Amino acid sequence: MQTAAVRHLVGSVTKTQGLRFAVVVACFNEIVTRQLLEGALDTFRKYSVNEEDIDISYESFDQVVWVPGSFEIGIVAERLGKSRNYHSIFCIGAVAYAVEPFSCCVPCIFSVLTCEDMDQALNPAGGISGNKGAECALTAIEMASLFDHHLK
């Protein structure tokens, strides 16, 4: 019995040079989303993503696009994805119930927390549960690398 060789494609978190990212952040529950963003930015820096390769809707950067809430993330991420200027779109929000997924041309990583109360939201935003922003930034790097190096 013969078997065909199977090629396994995985993204890399070390091949970040030239990868471009867009970050969309919801204003709603900003006490949570701002901490998730900080965790994501720290992780991008840790993995040598150049700051000029990250377009962020954030007050301290030139490219500022905060959306009112998590439901508005999808349409902005889709528009950014269709521009084909990014290898990955990183979305940050915090809602009390799930957001329906959408399709796009590039990986869109959702760091959208679904929480029953503020304590539940703050724990994964740098509290006792770590920082989901940092975790999802790593996912964005890996997916961008996978698409850029293997799935063009």
Image (cartoon, rainbow, N blue to C red):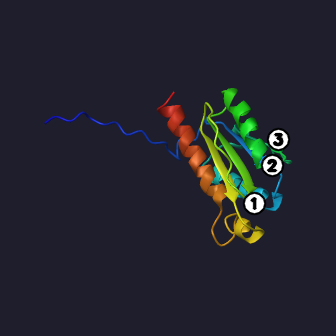
In percent of width and height, residue 85 lies at 68, 29
When the figure is inspected, residue 129 is found, relative to residue 107, above or below; the finding is below
Q: Residue at x 69, y 59 (%)?
A: 114
Q: Position of residue 21 (x, y in %)?
A: 67, 39
Q: CA distance from mark 3 to mark 1?
A: 17 Å
**Amino acid type at mark 1:** Gln
Estimate how packed mark 2 is, as few (under 14), some (14 to 19) or many (20 or more) residues with alpha carbons within 10 Å.
some
Q: Quadrant of the N terminus?
A: top left
- Estimate the x, y position of residue 34 in percent, counting from the top left: 78, 57
- Residue 64 or residue 110, whichever sits in front: 110
User: Front-most of 51 and 140?
Assistant: 140
Q: Residue at x 67, y 32 (%)?
A: 81
Which image quarter: residue 77? top right
Q: How many marks?
A: 3
Is any atom of residue 93 visible in this view?
Answer: yes
Relative side of 17 to 9, left or right? right
Q: Would you identify the image quadrant in which residue 53 lies?
A: top right
Q: Amino acid at mark 3?
A: Val
- Residue 69 image label: 2
Residue 112 pos. (x, y %): 69, 53
Callout 3: helix, strand or loop?
A: loop
Q: Counting residues from the N terminus, which is met first, the one under dot 1 or under dot 2?
A: 1
How far apart in space, not on screen, are marks 1 and 2 (Cα)? Answer: 16 Å
Residue with the mark numbered 1: 35
Q: What residue sits right under mark 3 in the picture?
A: 65
Q: CA distance from mark 2 to mark 3?
A: 12 Å
Between 126 and 104, the one lying in front of the other is 104
Say above or below: 31 vs 51.
below
Q: Callout 2, which amino acid?
A: Gly
